[in-house]
Image (cartoon, rainbow, N blue to C red):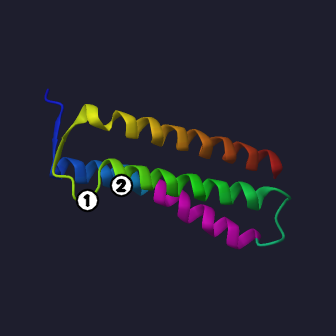
Amino acid sequence: MSGHLDAAQLSHLRHELRTPINHVIGYSEMLLEDIADDGPSGVHAKLTAIIREARAAVTAIQGGMGSNATATDARELAPMAVTIMSHAERIRACCEECRALT
């Protein structure tokens, strides 16, 4: 199996990575609107942190596999994967903290 990804494969991978992250952003924004100022103390800050981390993950995806990318060796994506995983871990932690606050 080759580690080479062509432009179509990169586009598909970029889409598959961004889609669930964009769902996290959208859902978190909806929750922010719903709680406004009436939510439990600290939830607003945690939701804002979730949105910030998710947007940073999308930025990392775009930086690692921008729409101008035509082909790459899959191994070149490893640093981006580490960055995305660190954002995902921070998102998970914020979600757990939100759960504890409600």
Residue 31: tell me if it is visible: yes
Check residue 67 in the rendering and tell me which mark sits there, or answer none. Answer: 1
Q: Residue at x 44, y 35 (%)?
A: 82
Q: Are marks 2 and 1 in contact (CB under 8 Å)?
A: yes
> Residue 86 placed where, x, y %?
53, 38
Q: Residue furthest top?
A: 1
Q: Residue at x 46, y 42 (%)?
A: 84
Earlier in the chain: of badge 2 and badge 1, it is 2
* Residue position marked by numbered label 2 in the rendering: 62
Q: Is residue 88 magenta?
A: no
> Residue 11 placed where, x, y %?
24, 54
For label 2, the SS is helix
> Residue 21 placed where, x, y %?
47, 54
- Magenta segment, which residues? 21-35
Q: Is residue 75 above or below residue 83?
A: above
Check residue 59 in the rendering and tell me which mark sits there, or answer none. Answer: none
Q: Local crowd at mark 2 within 10 Å, few (<14), some, or many (≥20)?
A: some
| Residue type pointed to by label 1 | Ser
Q: Residue at x 74, y 58 (%)?
A: 45
Residue 79 falls in image quadrant: top left
Residue 20: tell me if it is visible: no
Disc 2 from disc 1: Cα separation: 7 Å
> Residue 74 placed where, x, y %?
24, 35
